[in-house]
Image (cartoon, rainbow, N blue to C red):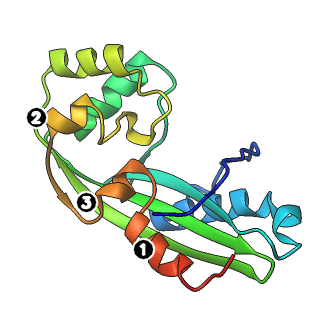
Amino acid sequence: MGFEFDIKIIPTDEGYDASMSPMEIASSIAIKKAEQFKEMVADGKHLVITADTIVSIGSQILNKPADHAEAYKMLKLLSGNKHTVYTGVCIATNKGLDFFVQGTDVYFNELTDEEINYYIEKCQPFDKAGSYGVQEWVGYIGIKKIEGCYFNVMGLPLNELYKRLKKYSY
C-alpha cells in the first residue's frame, strides 16, 4: 500500500472469555496486542497496527491446530460448508486506540480425505486459524466462493485499513 514499516512481535496472551462473540474475540485480542506497544507509541512518532483473525463455523471457533489430527478435523468440518473469518484490527497511537472488525463469509467445496491430507502434509497449516491459508493450495481448489474481503481471509483487511490510515500523518 506504499507504507514503510517494521514488523515487531511481542508475545501476548491470546486467551479470551468463551462467552464472547467471534467479533468480540477478534477485536479484544487485537487490542491486547496493541496494548503491548504503549511505550513505542507514547512519543507520537510511531503508529502500531495489530490484528487477530478468528475462524467461526456456527458457534464454534477454530483456532490454530495443534497437530495433524486437529487440522484434519477442522478441514473436514469446513468441507462443503460456509464459515466466517473475522479479523480484528487495532491502530495504536499516542492519542489512543482505533479498532474495527471485518467479517468475510467463505464457502468450501467438499474436500476428499486425500485432498485434506495432501494439504496438511505439503503446507503444514499449523500457524493458521481454521487450519488453512486462502492463498495456498487448498484455497485454490477448495474455496467455492467468498463474500467480502479476500485480504481479510488472509489476515488483514487491507482496503478498510488503508481508509483508516489515511487520517494519520507520520
**Which SS class for mark 3?**
strand
Mark 1 near mark 3, Cβ–Cβ under 8 Å?
no
Which image quarter is the N terminus in?
bottom left
The residue carrying mark 1 is 160
Q: Residues within 10 Å of mark 3 (few under 14, many from 20)?
A: some
**Which SS class for mark 1?**
helix
Q: Residues within 10 Å of mark 1 (few under 14, many from 20)?
A: some
Distance of label 2 from label 3 (alpha carbons): 16 Å
Mark 2 near mark 1, Cβ–Cβ under 8 Å?
no
Q: Toward the viewer: 17 or 116? A: 116
Indicate the amino acid at tag 1.
Glu
Distance of label 1 from label 3 (alpha carbons): 16 Å
Q: Residue at x 10, y 34 (%)?
A: 110
Q: Which mark is residue 105?
A: 3
Q: Residue at x 13, y 41 (%)?
A: 80
Give x and y (percent) for residue 165.
55, 76
Give x and y (percent) for residue 126.
47, 27
Q: Residues within 10 Å of mark 2 (few under 14, many from 20)?
A: some
Give x and y (percent) for residue 52.
54, 54
